[in-house]
């Protein structure tokens, strides 16, 4: 097992198998590999060049610096490897306060999304004091819908995304803090 990783931008959360911390530049190689895969990027805007990925990491780090929230990097305890990213985030003009997730291809099917999302939702409700959480999910992204369902979120219908994502259809899944208290007990 690796030593608990940290970031100067925010907290490190810990689950049974993962550390969640704001991104650092050491995440760049795996993040770039993840964003070069057409399958894993199919529902999050598509493949990106290494230049775009670097700017994306910088943008997420900026969210942490400006708002005290943003995507966490998922670090596998057993290997120290970057496995994906997960909210809490609330970009300008977003349809709500989101806990969203995207995992590297070799991290899927292991339950990491639910494990990390549960810790992130605890953080959003208990630390950030959010009253409600959404998940913006492409209607064809059945795997993410299953994660949302396991968390106890329900489909609230179509949502409108801000530019430049306004042409990407999403369903807004979500739940309130009170609903999460009940749903968290069964996870």
Image (cartoon, helix red, strand yellow):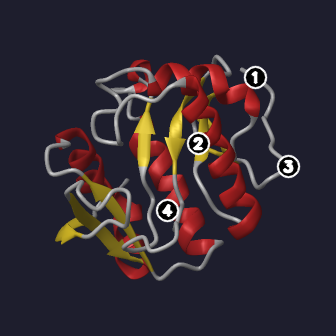
Secondary element under disc 4, as helix, strand or loop, is helix
Give the spatial CA distance, label 4 vs label 1. Answer: 24 Å
- At 15% from the left and 51% from the top, the residue drawn is 139
Q: Label 4: few (<14), some or many (≥20) within 10 Å?
A: many
- At 67% from the left and 28% from the top, the residue drawn is 27
Q: Label 2: few (<14), some or many (≥20) within 10 Å?
A: some
Mark 4 near mark 3, Cβ–Cβ under 8 Å? no
> Which of marks 1 and 4 precedes in the sequence?
1
Q: Quadrant location of the N terminus?
A: top right
> Which of marks 3 and 4 precedes in the sequence?
3
Q: Could you tell me residue 113's position as x and y percent?
A: 41, 41
Q: Label 3: few (<14), some or many (≥20) within 10 Å?
A: few
Residue identified by numbered label 3? 8
Residue 17 seen in this snapshot: no
Give the spatial CA distance, label 1 vs label 3. Answer: 18 Å
- At 59% from the left and 64% from the top, the residue drawn is 123
Q: Is residue 123 found left or right of 152 in the rendered image? A: right
Secondary element under disc 1, as helix, strand or loop, is loop
Q: Label 1: few (<14), some or many (≥20) within 10 Å?
A: few
Residue identified by numbered label 1? 2
Residue identified by numbered label 4? 121
Q: Could you tell me residue 99's position as x and y percent?
A: 45, 59
> Which of marks 2 and 3 precedes in the sequence?
3
Judged by depth in the image, the label closer to the viewer, 4 or 2, is 2
């Amino acid at each position: 097992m690796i030593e608990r990783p940290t970031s100067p931008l925010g907290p490190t959360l810990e689950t049974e198998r993962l550390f969640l911390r704001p991104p650092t530049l050491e995440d760049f190689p795996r993040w770039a590999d993840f964003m070069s895969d057409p399958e894993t990027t199919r529902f999050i805007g598509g493949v990106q060049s290494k230049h775009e990925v670097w700017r994306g990491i910088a943008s997420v780090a900026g969210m942490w610096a400006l708002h005290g929230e943003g995507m966490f990097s998922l670090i596998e305890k057993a290997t120290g490897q970057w496995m994906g990213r997960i909210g809490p985030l609330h970009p300008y003009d977003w349809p709500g306060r989101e806990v969203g997730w995207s995992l590297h291809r070799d991290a899927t099917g292991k339950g990491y999304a639910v494990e990390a999302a549960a810790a992130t939702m605890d953080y959003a409700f208990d630390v950030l004091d959010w009253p409600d959480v959404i998940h913006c999910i492409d209607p064809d992204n059945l795997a993410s819908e299953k994660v949302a369902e396991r968390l106890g979120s329900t489909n609230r219908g179509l949502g409108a995304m801000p530019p430049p994502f306004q042409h990407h259809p999403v369903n807004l899944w979500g739940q309130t803090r009170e609903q999460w208290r009940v749903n968290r007990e069964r996870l």
